[in-house]
Image (cartoon, rainbow, N blue to C red):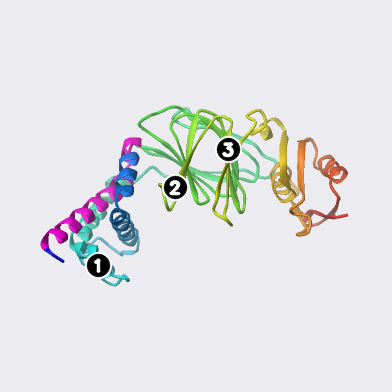
Amino acid sequence: MNQDAVIKDEEIAARAAAWVVRLRADDVTVADWDEATAWLEADLAHRHAFDEAEGLWNATDQLPSVRSPVIDLAARRQSRRPVRPWLFAAPAMAAAVAAAFLLVPSLQSAPAVVYRTAPGEIRMVSLDDGSRLQINGGSTLSVRMERGRRVVRMDQAEAVFDVAHDADRPFLIDVGESQVRVVGTAFNIRRSADETAVSVLRGVVEVSDVDSPSRKVRLTVGQAVRRADADDRMAVGSVDVRTAAAWTEGRRAYDNRPLSEIAADLSRAFDTPVTVAPDVASLHFSGVLILDDETAVIDRLERFLPIKATRGPQGVRLERR
């Protein structure tokens, strides 16, 4: 490798390390994210260098102290395989990441606040920035308010977000393998055990891949995206904004949705969990269910579908009739 190539690799490595630090700062802006995305998409070497720098950053979590971070990081880096030509920039990258590690205390974000709801419980939450969350039953999510961004992480949960506008402070939601980014809008997110669904009620949101930020879709009012963990495909379609968050008004609207999804929704809405037998999980249902009483809802499903409900100590199980 000639001297010019070495210098270029060192410059890429240093830039990648700088982006890793910047995107984790409390005051990161939407412009920063856009500029970083453009830089990553400009050259595959940028993406490789960023991944390597991010790996080094994450490795600092395993260090017992900040003593000799350059040596530790460089040694860890040398042990990684396979070796690529641009990795000769290791000293520059290790030094940059090590310097960032020494600055970690100044980049610490505000502690996350965790919200949990029991099945059948709906909770209203008002955030310091004026945003409002309506959290469905059986949900767990955390909120961290930072100087440069607002970050939510969702486990198995469902919530309607009404986000206060702040152009310099994006609202980011990590859910499953996706990230939702907004400035100010209203939308519903449903995260089940194996699928993420985002429906836009007002404004515009961007849904991207956590591991590949350049892979993304933009949704506007009346649009929704579903992403199943199994096939990793982002399926964009239309949604009725009058029914997308109907659960907040005590009802659920379905358009050809599988019984497994309906059972999961009922388990959020009522205290008694609802499960389905494998041979009926893929049965589809269209219609509106009034969530007034669990027994009444199950009776309605039994009239519309070839199923029967078996009640036991573990809850309600829907089986083929």
Residue 93 vs 268, above or below: the answer is below
Q: How many residues crowd around disc 3 within 10 Å: few (fewer than 14), some, or many (20 or more)? A: many
Residue at label 1?
Answer: 72
| Distance from the alpha carbon under mark 3 to that under mark 1 | 46 Å
Q: Amino acid at mark 2?
A: Arg
Residue at label 3?
Answer: 224
Q: Which mark is residue 215?
A: 2
Please say if the residues under marks 2 and 1 sit with CB atoms less than 8 Å apart: no
Residue 300 point in image, percent of width and height: 85, 41
In the foreground, 258 or 298: 258
Residue 30 colored magenta?
yes
Q: Which residues are magenta?
A: 3-32
Residue 22 point in image, percent of width and height: 29, 45
| Distance from the alpha carbon under mark 3 to that under mark 2 | 16 Å
Residue 269 vs 65, above or below: the answer is above
Label 2 or label 1, whichever comes before in sequence order: 1
